[in-house]
């Protein structure tokens, strides 16, 4: 095995260690569907506090959600909407996935056991041969280097799913 293969395997194993453990796929599915629904409902409730964002699941709404996020981040005011920054980022990640589902007839939510760790599961949005994990996809969004224009949600949608 060459160095790159060992390096990649180590990265994959370390990532697997961060995933949530479940007894079986059914338990993981129940958890992740509840997780998704809870976050989307909370986002809907807190969005009533602002005129900046309404969760209509359009692709354009991703830009508005990201603008709201950065407004809250710059003012350090996530607590004013009753959340931590990390909770808001989790909502963003799940909302991004739901936008994909609602705008792509053949896209779907998938719960899959991670191939490098037993009993560890991922929550993915999948379309064709493309599957992207959504749990904490946009963790530390404020810090992502490729986001100077602050349109990463929209660009990531187009990168993976606008075909």
Image: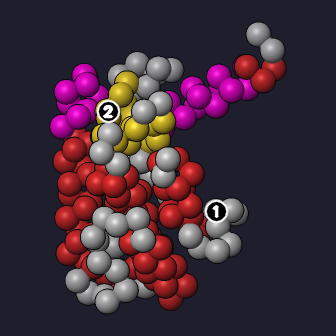
**Vertical placement of 160 versus 96: above or below?**
above
Can residue 100 be seen here?
A: yes
CA gap, disc 1 to disc 2?
Answer: 26 Å
Residue at left offset 70%, top offset 63%: 145
What kind of element bears circle 1?
loop
Q: In front: 90, or 105?
A: 105
Q: Is residue 155 left or right of residue 100?
A: right
Residue underneath mark 2: 111
Helix, strand or loop: magenta stretch: helix
**Vertical placement of 154 versus 104: above or below?**
below
Q: Tell me, yes or no, whether the highlighted magenta stretch contains residue 152.
A: no
Q: Tell me, yes or no, whether the highlighted magenta stretch contains residue 20.
A: yes
Residue at left offset 40%, top offset 58%: 96
x, y percent for residue 19: 43, 36
Residue at left offset 31%, top offset 89%: 51
Q: How many marks?
A: 2
Residue contact at pointers 1 and 2, CB within 8 angstroms: no
Assess disc 1: are there few (<14), some (14-19) or many (≥20) residues with their C-alpha within 10 Å of its C-alpha: few
Which of disc 2 and disc 1 is earlier in sequence? 2
**Vertical placement of 52 versus 146: above or below?**
below
Can residue 69 be seen here?
A: no
Q: Which residues are magenta?
A: 6-30
What kind of element bears circle 2?
strand
């Amino acid at each position: 095995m060459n160095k790159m293969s060992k390096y990649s395997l180590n990265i994959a194993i370390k990532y697997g260690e961060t995933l949530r453990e479940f007894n079986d796929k059914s338990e993981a599915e129940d958890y992740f569907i509840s997780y998704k629904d809870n976050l989307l409902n909370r986002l809907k409730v807190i969005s009533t506090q602002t005129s900046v964002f309404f969760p209509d699941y359009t692709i354009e709404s991703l830009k508005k959600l990201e603008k709201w996020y950065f407004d809250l981040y710059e003012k350090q005011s996530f607590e004013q909407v009753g959340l931590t920054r990390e909770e808001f980022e989790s909502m963003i990640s799940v909302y991004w996935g739901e936008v994909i589902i609602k705008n792509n007839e053949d896209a779907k939510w998938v719960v899959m056991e991670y191939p490098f760790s037993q009993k560890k599961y991922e929550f993915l949005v999948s379309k064709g041969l493309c599957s992207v994990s959504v749990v904490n996809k946009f963790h530390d969004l404020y810090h992502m280097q490729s986001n100077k224009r602050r349109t990463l949600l929209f660009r990531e949608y187009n990168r993976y799913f606008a075909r």
